[in-house]
């Protein structure tokens, strides 16, 4: 009489040979999933050092300027801080109406390499302080820079990554909503540079360039520095 093959019966314990097989299969599947997850994570590119601190509010003192983009020029002389509202747009009218005044503004800081955005959702407090003189722009001549048109809010911390084709639709909405456009590039020494983009006359970047946001382009224009930022007055954008 031949020996019976082990079989599984629902209401009885699993036979030892089948239990070993099931445990081995589960272990192999778990190892495969863990390995795939680790490989996927390691393959992701570094989104950069941008930070959006939503745990702490910051209060800054300075003068608000609105030309061409809303910005607070800190009283301590540090680079201008771009002012934004909540969501994909510029600051509320209650902030814009205080352009030209010295204020105390509170909000959340987004920061990348010392370039900052302050997301404000409440009106700043007007201060009785003398208005500092705004420095004149320093001309650095014309340049052609290979870069990508970005929106400042996402690239400086709101999104990771805040660039590339996967972020194109978001960046277009942000710039169309009033978020200042910018480019970022790294020079031969490895130093990162950031420039806000304007029209040739210094007004906000024309809408004709919105379709080229998040695309690899070569941007030509006059480069100046002011308020701790570089500014590129665009004369041509080649795809």
Image (cartoon, rainbow, N blue to C red):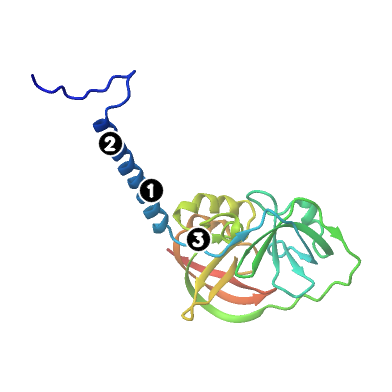
Given residues 129 and 23, the one toward you in this image is 23
- Residue 20 is marked as 2
Q: Nearer the viewer, mark 3 or mark 2?
A: 2
Taking the image as shown, residue 143 lies to the left or right of residue 86, namely left
- Residue 47 is marked as 3
Given residues 65 and 114, the one toward you in this image is 114
Q: Quadrant of residue 207?
A: bottom right
- Give x and y (percent) for residue 234: 55, 69
Taking 204 as reference, is 78 above or below it? below
Taking the image as shown, residue 135 lies to the left or right of residue 203, namely right
Q: Secondary structure at mark 2?
A: helix
10 Å neighbourhood of mark 2: few (<14), some, or many (≥20)? few
Quadrant where the image shows the N terminus: top left
- Mark 1 or mark 3, earlier in chain: 1
Q: Nearer the viewer, mark 1 or mark 3?
A: 1
10 Å neighbourhood of mark 1: few (<14), some, or many (≥20)? few
Q: Is residue 202 visible?
A: no
Instruction: Residue at 26%, 35% (x, y): give it.
Output: 21
- Mark 3 or mark 2, earlier in chain: 2
Q: Does the residue at mark 3 contact the one at mark 2 (Cβ under 8 Å)?
A: no
Tell me the residue that label 1 is attached to.
34
10 Å neighbourhood of mark 3: few (<14), some, or many (≥20)? few
- Give x and y (percent) for residue 143: 51, 77
Given residues 155 and 41, the one toward you in this image is 41
- Mark 2 or mark 1, earlier in chain: 2
Q: Secondary structure at mark 3?
A: loop
């Amino acid at each position: 009489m031949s020996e019976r093959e082990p079989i599984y019966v629902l209401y009885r314990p699993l036979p030892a040979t089948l239990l070993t097989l099931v445990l081995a299969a589960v272990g192999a599947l778990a190892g495969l999933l863990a390995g795939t997850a680790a490989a996927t994570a390691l393959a992701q590119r570094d989104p950069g050092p941008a930070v959006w601190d939503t745990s702490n509010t910051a209060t800054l003192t300075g003068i608000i300027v609105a030309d061409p983009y809303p910005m607070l020029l800190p009283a301590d002389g540090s680079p201008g801080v771009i002012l934004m509202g909540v969501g994909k747009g510029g600051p509320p009218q209650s902030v814009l109406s205080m352009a030209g005044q010295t204020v105390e503004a509170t909000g959340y800081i987004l920061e990348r390499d010392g370039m900052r955005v302050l997301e404000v959702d409440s009106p700043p407090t007007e201060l009785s302080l003398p208005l500092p003189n705004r420095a004149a722009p320093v001309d650095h001549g014309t340049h052609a820079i290979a870069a990508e048109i970005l929106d400042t809010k996402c690239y400086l911390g709101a999104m990771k990554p805040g660039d590339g084709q996967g972020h194109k639709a978001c960046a277009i909405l942000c710039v169309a909503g009033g978020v200042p456009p910018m480019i970022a590039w790294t020079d031969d020494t490895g130093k990162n540079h950031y420039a806000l983009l304007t029209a040739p006359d210094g007004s906000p970047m024309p809408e004709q360039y919105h379709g080229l946001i998040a695309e690899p382009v070569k941007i030509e224009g006059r480069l100046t520095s002011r308020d701790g930022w570089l500014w590129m007055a665009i004369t041509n954008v080649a795809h």
